[in-house]
Image (cartoon, coloured by chain):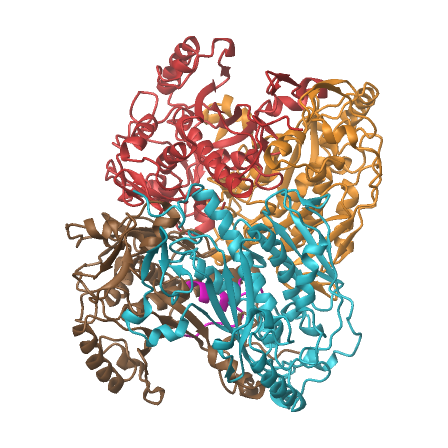
Chain colours: A cyan, B brown, C orange, D red
Amino acid sequence: MSHNTFGHLFRVTTWGESHGPAIGCVVDGCPPRIALTEADIQPWLDRRRPGQSKYTTQRQEPDEVRILSGTLDGLTTGTPIALEIQNVDQRSRDYGAIAQQFRPGHADLAYEMKYGIRDHRGGGRSSARETASRVAAGAVARRVLGDAVQVRGAMVQMGAHAVDRARWDWDAVGRNPLFCPDPATAEAWEAELAEIRRAGSSVGAVIEIVAEGVPPGLGAPIYAKLDADIAAALMGINAVKGVEIGDGFAAAAMRGEQNADEMRMVDGAVQFCSNHAGGVLGGISTGQAIVARFAVKPTSSILVPRQSVDRAGADVDIMTRGRHDPCVGIRAVPVGEAMVACVLADHLLRQRAQVPDAPGRTRLPRT
Amino acid sequence: MSHNTFGHLFRVTTWGESHGPAIGCVVDGCPPRIALTEADIQPWLDRRRPGQSKYTTQRQEPDEVRILSGTLDGLTTGTPIALEIQNVDQRSRDYGAIAQQFRPGHADLAYEMKYGIRDHRGGGRSSARETASRVAAGAVARRVLGDAVQVRGAMVQMGAHAVDRARWDWDAVGRNPLFCPDPATAEAWEAELAEIRRAGSSVGAVIEIVAEGVPPGLGAPIYAKLDADIAAALMGINAVKGVEIGDGFAAAAMRGEQNADEMRMVDGAVQFCSNHAGGVLGGISTGQAIVARFAVKPTSSILVPRQSVDRAGADVDIMTRGRHDPCVGIRAVPVGEAMVACVLADHLLRQRAQVPDAPGRTRLPRT
Amino acid sequence: MSHNTFGHLFRVTTWGESHGPAIGCVVDGCPPRIALTEADIQPWLDRRRPGQSKYTTQRQEPDEVRILSGTLDGLTTGTPIALEIQNVDQRSRDYGAIAQQFRPGHADLAYEMKYGIRDHRGGGRSSARETASRVAAGAVARRVLGDAVQVRGAMVQMGAHAVDRARWDWDAVGRNPLFCPDPATAEAWEAELAEIRRAGSSVGAVIEIVAEGVPPGLGAPIYAKLDADIAAALMGINAVKGVEIGDGFAAAAMRGEQNADEMRMVDGAVQFCSNHAGGVLGGISTGQAIVARFAVKPTSSILVPRQSVDRAGADVDIMTRGRHDPCVGIRAVPVGEAMVACVLADHLLRQRAQVPDAPGRTRLPRT
Amino acid sequence: MSHNTFGHLFRVTTWGESHGPAIGCVVDGCPPRIALTEADIQPWLDRRRPGQSKYTTQRQEPDEVRILSGTLDGLTTGTPIALEIQNVDQRSRDYGAIAQQFRPGHADLAYEMKYGIRDHRGGGRSSARETASRVAAGAVARRVLGDAVQVRGAMVQMGAHAVDRARWDWDAVGRNPLFCPDPATAEAWEAELAEIRRAGSSVGAVIEIVAEGVPPGLGAPIYAKLDADIAAALMGINAVKGVEIGDGFAAAAMRGEQNADEMRMVDGAVQFCSNHAGGVLGGISTGQAIVARFAVKPTSSILVPRQSVDRAGADVDIMTRGRHDPCVGIRAVPVGEAMVACVLADHLLRQRAQVPDAPGRTRLPRT
């Protein structure tokens, strides 16, 4: 994991700024002879696309992906897959003030201190727009994982309000603009979000990603732990401030007898009696569902004036104008899914390399 | 981050199992002409060493580190530094049952499913013993960071009980066996832990690591975000299930106006009015204190019988015997510090490479 | 060095096939605030461009490069620089036979055995066209190295005929289509090449790359040796079969007293009395000119029928039709320069990271 | 390939100086359940060990390897394998002069310019002693490759005299101290070497490594080309100045019709009619024998006075005293074999990851 490249064998390199001519990524290491056309990628980008409801930024981007290399007649060739998305809605406007000021909670000052230069247009490289490339790469990762692996996400908390897990319905996720797995909660959230939007404020969220069908044995014991790589992948999404696996922080408050997942033989196979571990033990997948959550902070672009400074060293008050994203956590759902899919694809290849004859769960027990 | 190597420029490769002849690590990429002898490393190992109080495992290991390469007359030479620690307390005993059974909450089954073989002696590679190598590497990282950077940790929650932050006293951390920054809470925890220990149970914990004096500009915007690398580093410690930066998961419940840290010019320099961000914006350090927390699950080795299975495919009940660690979170404090120090050292070198003339905070504002 | 990414800190990822819509690369890790526009890159691409003389393939490509990200107002921002070159001359024609046959000396069969699929159109990924991306990246590397470092190349042998080094004239290189540093030899080569071309044959070549102004201290002693990375960089160019540094293979025939470069103090600085080492000792640059050579095999696409097999398992005779490149070594000159520039830029950043206060030659001797 | 770590999946990290307490390496990424004990490694180290004939340095080292981790009951576990070799013959003597002077042809000055510090004792990290770690790692790589792959080397040129390939006999290699495949040449070389040794001089050599049984499809088209990685691996050996694959530099002088290897179907399988390519096309193995050669310069430690400078900036004359290695190329044979074995093991795992169902040669042709 270095610079703008992610992954060890299934490697994604992203490039592009919010207001340049295009953004994109190179997906390297993809196995050959996998069916892949733009039609396999576009639906995932469409889910992430802004401007689809009043709860996300009104930037209008078709986000149309184009495969520039790495496929032949609809099949991957094993060579690098270049994906490109044109930037269409680069409103030409006066960035004068933003160029000179550091917005609180944004990366403006950090970029300036690091690089001594900053592409201020729409946030430049730190824009959430970069995540479109990740979603595109995630679509390729899903093809590598195959249909037996399902990576899904949902928003499980908005502001202070969590979903009622007793009413969890995966089908509901696609039927409301907030990726909420519980229709009743979704309605309540929509009402709250409308109020927050009117107030020019914003709110944080928690997203949960669940990966089912993941074979046991992915990950590596020490620095390539599956959960460590998932943690990096999710923490690397814009505005994310926390990541947890399985019971996560709640595990800290537990006793040992509550937390460890017991096992029993059922129909000749090992079955876990619970999944506090979130599908990972010792950094290695167990075959249970991988469950990860991440916390997204409330977007800092709000219509309330905030104290800040400018490049000339003067105190200023800043108020975001124009497009406003009351809950960036919403669009983080497809991004989180994509990152987890990329991590899993990478580790699937790694495991295949080191242990092509891994016993897996199905062949346990052995004598 | 791959396999057993951590870091891009300041690279740590660890090796060794709990019950082999030794454990150790190779620290590569260390700058030359830094004063380094065993005396710079040993004190940090001593802090992590088990058997120092009744609250940690009674395994007795001197954990004496030896520098085998990479220094000359007490100075680093720029070549790989090999650090080695002999395993002394490898009690020879009958591992028969453990070899054949999968302890709930342990990596036993995961290793078996991944590799088809498992070093069952004391947990093998998944033993917490491996973390001694990290602490040793962290001591070298501290020397790279220099005295201006201070990386400290404390246990801030044990079970359900958090410290009272109003009484936070860094000096207190070293004066109680639980690394607790609040003496009153420390006493309460000790009482609770004594009870838990008697009950043969265990409890989880939350550790907080604070790095002060970190120059602004460390990290990189996308996949080498400073917080993403910290997340991976901490999630990669045994038994860790969650990581957060700054306000972390609490940020999800906040409104935008609460969360973003405002700025003001003070004496010609940019000052943040708060530190909800935990010292990282857009994946880049801001010069504020880096604040990270991680959750450690209760150790699974408890004296209460637990349901499991064995390699022959039979249901069994397992009860850990012998050494018992009622709260593995305690010893995780020096390990967490070490991992954060390694991440910072790595990013310090990376930033020096890419932006040797980074403006940093002190030179802002400029005209 | 993995997959399609080259370099550790200054990293180049290339993508694209001969007959896809475009080719390109992502240059990651470039320092910020370096002046860079298309005008800094285009001249180097123009030097490599085919179709400029009768001695290279007649494919006509404008090879116009476009910067899609990573710069602002003509300065690098420190974020990934995406470079893209449209493929224009993708002649639509019947590839039927080539798709089914394996051309001797080409990668056709190797790709098929590796991937089970092959983009046969114009050689796909194995086409020399990919090297345009390298030349573009090399132009960025030159900007990182700065004007004090000069990386130049020349063809020093064509077929069996080497240049007369006594007549070496760097200015001559740009004045003949064969990058020959000796006008008299250039004329002889042109005559020979015209004959080879008429015969439908091809010929090999040796290219020499010289980098002057390289600061001492670049490289690392063991696996990141400067010469090892140069060797990989040059051997990774299409059709290259050998690489040597300094005296290279000739050193094998020497005695110790002939080969080692003696030193003397001249005007207070260390001066080498010769440069048999080619500017590298122990894998580290010494401040002398880096001298590397590589051998390019004769292109396999010739108009003489050759024995081969097809995908159906039948013996066939193959004769290349259409464009014909009698000496691919010619265009390898700018490619070799670019690769050496990339290696040097990478190691410059690496050295700056590990040893920012390297004494270098100028400050030796010290007391 | 970075710093002191070699390989992408099968990764070797070496450490240690000539005169420290020990040297060693960590082999990471090795598949589990491979039989491995010290007895599998020691014979290869014994072949490399100095002091076995009068033609190599008289340093006496048992070079006894010890496995410190990564195996259980004689089987690899998939975790890092730490190998360690004690330094025994660290003659305590006065290094005063060497510490202050820069030996011509050695890395002394380069280290000093790079690091500003240098372990002068026996060459420190730049000592040929480091190659013992590589040979140990190579022994593990051989176990990964399995018995079907055979990696052998021989000295094919000493000074100006090449072997007579018509008399090549692999069995002869082990029967003379110069790894010469032709007994008659071996005798001539021995006579010459005795004379060179008496004269206090030294001589260079060319080594050839041949790997048979390598499956087709190893390597990757661009920067992970099998031949590029082999070139880096061999150029990274001490004193190596050139590397070539197949016909190598001789290919430059050839015509296209001479160089490309024609193919024919024989018994239903593709057969090459020659092997000018050295088993690699487009960076990918073809199933033919991999043939690589590297040139070793004459050792610079000779008994003839040489002009140099010292750290105080004075001109000095240097004459190596003590142990003298008239042809370091001799001991480079097992080292070259080891490096090629490591590259092949790495690429075997990589290919298995990306293309587990690679057709390979045996399944061609297909319909």
Spot occupied by residue B184 in the image (x, y as percentages of width and height): 25, 87
Spot occupied by residue D11 in the image (x, y as percentages of width and height): 43, 44
- Residue plotted at (43% across, 71% down): B243
Q: Which residues are magenta?
A: B210-233
Q: Is residue C222 magenta?
A: no
Q: Nearer the viewer, residue C44 or C209?
A: C44
Residue D300 appears anywhere in the view:
no
Determine the residue located farthest toward the front in the rendered image.
A267
Note whether C169 is above or below B213 in the view shown: above
Rendered image quadrant of residue B60: bottom left
Q: Nearer the viewer, residue A144 or D195?
A: A144
Q: Nearer the viewer, residue C289 or D268?
A: D268
Spot occupied by residue B121 in the image (x, y as percentages of width and height): 23, 51
Rendered image quadrant of residue A275: bottom left
Note whether D209 is above or below B10 in the view shown: above
Q: Looking at the rendering, in which quadrant would you find the C terminus of chain D?
A: top right
Note whether B245 is above or below D230 in the view shown: below
Left or right placement of residue C154 versus residue D364 in this view: right
Left or right placement of residue C81 versus residue D56 in this view: right
Q: Nearer the viewer, residue C159 or D215?
A: D215
Left or right placement of residue D143 versus residue C345 in this view: left
Residue B40 appears anywhere in the view:
yes
Spot occupied by residue C275 in the image (x, y as percentages of width and height): 55, 35
